[in-house]
Image (tube, coloured by chain):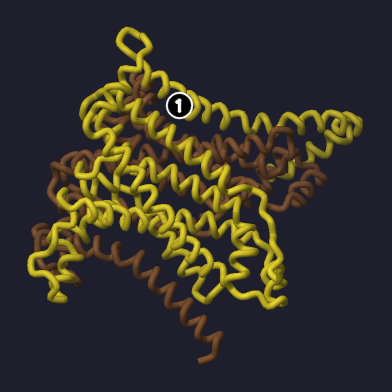
Chain colours: A yellow, B brown
Amino acid sequence: MSSRVETAGAWGEEVTSSPSVPSRRRPRVEAVAPYLLLAPSVFFLSVFVVWPAIQAIHLAFEGPNNTLTSYNFYQMTHEYTFWPSVKNTLIFMVSIIPLEFCLAFSMALIINTGLRGQQFFLYVWTIPLAISDLAAGIVWLSIYTQNGYFNSILHDLGLSQYGYQFLSYQNTFSLFAVCVVAEIWRSTSLVMLILLGGLQGIPREFGEAADVFGATFWQRLWRITLPLLKPSIRVALILRTIFAIQVFAVILALVGSNLPVLGAQAYNWYHSYQNPNIAAAYSIVILVLSVLTTAFYLTVVRNKAEIAGATR
Amino acid sequence: MSRHGLRLALLYAAALLITLFLLIPVYFIFAASIGPQNSVYDFPKPLVPQNLSFDTLSFFLHYQGVPEAFKMSVEVGIIAVAVSLILGAPAGYAIARYTFPGKNVLQLIVLATRSFPVIILSIPLAVTFLSWNLYDTAPGVGLVHTAMGLPVTILITAAVFYGVPVDLEEAATTLGCTRIGAFFRISLPMALPGLAAAALFTFVGSWNEVFAASILTLQNHTLPALVLTSLNIAPLQFSFAAAVILIVPSMVFIFFIRRYLVAGWGQVTK
């Protein structure tokens, strides 16, 4: 009922006012409208992302009584866990990214073949996306802890009577391996989604044309899919690396302080030692590493997608 | 077997292997927390739980601080969802419907903030929130989670509004609807499922987020923050049950938004 009245009003308006007035005013409104619609979001992101980022730099260089100092960095780098945590974070990042990328790419390719049960696989494969890093760490704790499921299976197979201590500080390799597996399990879904988004944007004709010319699967992959996928690959690598540098809860839940990493150090300095300045200094290290790796990817994985002929 | 058949078999074998790798750990954590409390220390553990009981889960749910943390997590999530929809939906609509100077730059900014490290934001915001009286409150954590969820909300809503034919809106305006009227009568109802997906996406992100939540709270922890600070204190069954309680809602939500996942994360600037 009410909608009818309003509609009538709108009709009446057009009859009473000259038709040229709305058509002249309309473009101006249209030109401003998108900015008005976007302004709240931009404002919010400035207050809660851009401004804190600037504040973080300020905090890291803040000394007593509002002075500027580099002492926080001096203290940070002279703490005995600093260099191990830088090293561990980098090793972690370097061992995860290639493994995870290959797995995620295979998963995206499998989904993109359009096999039967595609929807089922896509759902199951994105389940880890719903699982927090903390919960993921605990999930793998139930597997790798000394009386956990992995040792139980080894016991059932007669390979070990009491089980191994995978999470002991004495065994650095297994500490890393455990965390890498947990992190790959948790976050491959995200990389897969980004790559799948890219794959779905590649016109089917390209692949069909390659088939007509008798290209093999690998030729197609190397000459057509990968070059066209470059923008997605770049975003996936950047996002994934930035998240890997921040790794934190998976490691805290699984191995605690046996494997110090930058994210956990920042957390400890703020939470346990109540020193926001050194915590901020750690976060600046994370920021610098993120910016450097992003710049690295932007220069190495160039945007110029050259489609080399598959028949060449 | 034909060449084609062999390839298909290999494809399914790979798909199955990946599925097992992703599902078996979820099965184990459920198995570990469905049983009497002391069963977490059993060795060797039966791969199929023997004594089914909700003892461990109920122990967790009645643990000191857990009901409050549960409530806090829900409050924080609702705030994050509400604010990011109110701010993000118009922005997504603008990106989908208008072409305007600076659009590419704005899109790039949205994509870039999606990946901005939350560790860097949390520490200065904790200091700021102390002076704004937002420290250790649900709105404080909710606003930070909004900052994390907003970019993805904008991307999903933009994708959703792209999917609503602009012709329908134009048809409505020629029939006398105002542009705003057309939006509320035509586009919004059609976009509702997608907007709901964006909301769930933000909620899951907020429900799972642990770093900012533990930095920005002291006593009023969210569930993940409480679990994180209890890792070294609470018994093992506490953590196992906590993981299950954290995982279940997210798994349900992700089921409902599975169609929008590619829109939220798969988008890339050209």
Q: Is residue A227 left or right of residue A95?
A: right
Check disc 1 and report the residue beneath it. Answer: A53
Chain where mark 1 sits: A
Q: Percent x, y for residue A140?
A: 25, 57
How many numbered discs? 1
Residue located farthest toward the front when viewing the structure as drawn: A312
- Crowdedness near tag 1: few (<14), some (14–19) or many (≥20) residues, C-alpha within 10 Å: many
Query: Which of B34 and A50 lies nearest the eye of the viewer?
Result: A50
Task: Classify residue A33 by image quadrant.
Answer: top right
Q: Is residue B218 left or right of residue B78?
A: left
Query: Which amino acid is tagged 1?
Result: Ala
Task: Classify residue B143 by image quadrant.
Answer: top left
Query: Which of A109 and A213 lies nearest the eye of the viewer?
Result: A213
The image quadrant where one finds the C terminus of chain A is bottom right
User: Is residue B134 in sight in this rendering?
Assistant: yes
Q: Percent x, y for residue A207?
A: 67, 70
Task: Classify residue B66 by image quadrant.
Answer: top left
Q: Residue at x 69, y 72 (%)?
A: A210
Q: Residue at x 30, y 62 (%)?
A: B26
Query: Is A78 situated above or below B168?
Result: above
Q: Is residue B227 left or right of residue B178?
A: left
Query: Which of A304 and B134 lies nearest the eye of the viewer?
Result: A304
Query: Which of A9 and A21 lies nearest the eye of the viewer?
Result: A21
Q: Residue at x 26, y 29 (%)?
A: A269
Q: Percent x, y for residue A6?
A: 74, 39
Q: Percent x, y for residue A99?
A: 41, 59
Query: Is B127 situated above or below B40?
Result: above
Secondary-structure class at tag 1: helix
Q: Residue at x 49, y 49 (%)?
A: A237
User: Is residue B139 in sight in this rendering?
Assistant: no
